[in-house]
Image (tube, grey):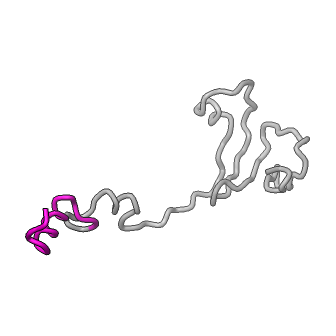
Amino acid sequence: MINGGKLRLDGQIMSKPHRAALPGMVLTFQQATQIRVIEILELGNRRGPAPEAQALYKDLSPQIPKPKSDKSFSDEFEFRDTGSGRPTKRERRQTTKLKDPFAL
């Protein structure tokens, strides 16, 4: 991210990774489709669990409301009406019997 110029430290674009981050500095970067603004509160001494790491910074990012939708893709998939979609094995056999009464 730094070599690509996609990280800002106190508003200045970082082009080289040599500059150290200190408490009180503000990092700005893009994470997926969201712009994150992070203020460094303390520096960690070790690599630890996520709750411990989250205590070392303060998130100043603007909260963007998510668009409200009636149903998400997963809701539609999980709760289908009976009879919609592909026929079950039983329904397929019944259809085959209707078309050809001598079929197995």
Question: Image check: 24 left or right of 34?
Answer: right
Residue 13, position in %: x, y? 85, 55
Q: Quadrant of residue 91?
A: bottom left
For the C terminus, give its image quadrant: bottom left
Residue 18, position in %: x, y? 91, 41
Q: Is residue 53 above or below residue 38?
A: above
Instruction: Depth check: give the residue in front, 56 or 74.
Output: 74
Q: Is residue 90 magenta?
A: yes
Tally the marks: 0
Q: Is residue 98 magenta?
A: yes
Q: Residue furthest bottom?
A: 99
Question: Image check: 62 left or right of 11?
Answer: left
Instruction: Depth check: give the residue in front, 88 or 31.
Output: 88
Residue located 34% across and 60% down the image: 77
Instruction: Depth check: give the residue in front, 77 or 92.
Output: 92
Question: Image check: 50 left or right of 26?
Answer: left
Residue located 79% across and 56% down the image: 6
Residue 48, position in %: x, y? 65, 27
Question: Image check: 33 left or right of 9?
Answer: left
Q: Is residue 80 above or below residue 50?
A: below
Residue 42, position in %: x, y? 73, 33
Q: Residue furthest top?
A: 46
Q: Quadrant of residue 5?
A: bottom right
Residue located 67% across and 57% down the image: 35
Q: Residue furthest left?
A: 101
In the image, the segment drawn in magenta is: 85-104
